[in-house]
Image (cartoon, rainbow, N blue to C red):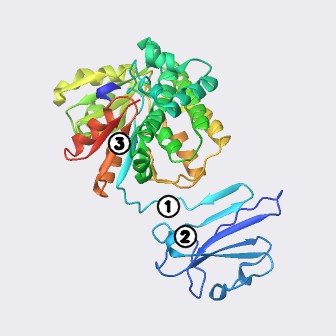
Amino acid sequence: MRSHFIGNLLTNPSSHSHHLILNLSLSSSIPKMSSITLPPVLPVRMITFNASESLNSCNSSSFTGSRRGIRIRDFSSENLNKSRLSMSVSVGSRTAVDDALFSDYKPSCAFLFPGQGAQAVGMGMEAQNVPAAANLYKKANDILGFDLLDVCTNGPKEKLNSTVISQPAIYVTSLAAVEVIRARDGGQQIIDSVDVTCGLSLGEYTALAFAGAFSFEDGLKLVKLRGEAMQEAADAAKSAMVSVIGLDSEKVQLLCDAANQEVDEENKVQIANFLCPGNYAVSGGVKGVEALEAKAKSFKARMTVRLAVAGAFHTSFMEPAVSRLEAALAATEVKTPRIPVISNVDAQPHADPDTIKKILARQVTSPVQWETTVKNLLAKGLKKSYELGPGKVIAGIVKRMDKSAAIENIGA
């Protein structure tokens, strides 16, 4: 797409060792199981107890000692993140987390990761000067079964642009860019200051890996499978994507409606990527895309640009990929991210690992809400952002939405 594609206690019958962790303020009653804002000067205590113990055996106004099956630890307010704790309930190795944990996030510094289309022959060369970055390509070779760095640096372009290659290539190169910034003076301080992250389509996986939701290796395995599944779905039906330049989203929708009147159900088109005002990507059947291209001038579009992708991403054309992603995600350990990661599906951050898995599976058939994501970040007071990885697509989008926005490109 290059420059144009710009509590509730869970039970486990097989286990008798259950734990419930609640955040409690020093009040006379146990609050509802949700996030709690605590007075900054009061201590709070974390209570862990066996599921066989009744909640009624705990008097929240007198947590001053210990009972059978109950352990009490004090936490002073300075150890709390903005005087806030979240509720979590764990059973064995499973944990249910309040999915709204990050709902009131206040961004100041963001890491933004590019999606498919940002790839270019020669990427990855700079990363070889940073041992930690270079090592990511070596790890990738074992997982992918081919020399990723060679394809990134030498091409050929057609091979790098293929969905099954470009998605892993962008994922690895973007995380290599994190190591590039870490290695420079003050780089670790920049990384430590990042309090929100997100990525465009594929870039959401990169953002989740950066935020610690899953390991580099597990993320790469998911991305590899995602690329293969999306390619197979694209091969199963004749479909395409096109960028519509120069129209707002309402007029692009009207253009889609007009094109859809001329084609059958299998060739209908829809907005697949809400990128920024004046730049929206449309996906659908080839005949529908052709009809849209023919009508674009009459709707006063400045131009249309057919995208070099395998098919109609972020539409129902990708439905065959969903089940494969669901199975892979079910087998992957996903943790609550350490910072908010904004979803492409609903432009919101999610904390519950099971919810994150469901959303990632839905992402390939859902329109990308990138415009709303960037608008929300800017409206919430984002001061500085970094685009990490190949290309400058995201920087172009951010600048188009706010010319005064501070964003820096970190390549690899």
How far from the left and from the top, in percent, is residue 332?
65, 41
Give the secondary structure at mark 1: loop
Q: Nearer the viewer, mark 2 or mark 3?
A: 3
* Residue occupying image coordinates x 58% and y 67%: 87
> Which label sits on residue 382?
none
- Which of the pair 21/304 is nearer the observer? 21
Question: What residue is disc 1 on?
Answer: 100
> Which label sits on residue 386?
3
- The crowd level at tag 2 (other Cα within 10 Å; few <14, some 14-19, many 20+) is some
> Which label sits on residue 34?
2
As measured in the structure, the alpha-carbon distance from the residue carrying label 1 to the one carrying label 3 is: 25 Å
How far from the left and from the top, in percent, is residue 309?
41, 22
Q: Quadrant of residue 86?
A: bottom right
Query: Along the horizontal axis of the image, is 380 left or right of 192?
Result: left
Give the secondary structure at mark 2: loop
Name the N-terminal-most of marks 1 and 3.
1
Is residue 238 visible in the rendered structure shown here?
no
Name the N-terminal-most of marks 1 and 2.
2
Quadrant where the image shows the C terminus:
top left
- Which of the pair 81/259 is nearer the observer? 81
Is residue 138 visible in the rendered structure shown here?
yes
- The crowd level at tag 3 (other Cα within 10 Å; few <14, some 14-19, many 20+) is many
As measured in the structure, the alpha-carbon distance from the residue carrying label 1 to the one carrying label 2 is: 9 Å
The answer to whether residue 99 is above or below residue 296 is below
Q: Report the amino acid beneath label 1.
A: Ala
How far from the left and from the top, in percent, is residue 339?
48, 54
Q: Quadrant of residue 242?
A: top left
How far from the left and from the top, in percent, is residue 281?
33, 31
Quadrant where the image shows the N terminus:
top left
Name the N-terminal-most of marks 2 and 3.
2
Q: Report the amino acid beneath label 2.
A: Ser
* Residue occupying image coordinates x 45% and y 68%: 82
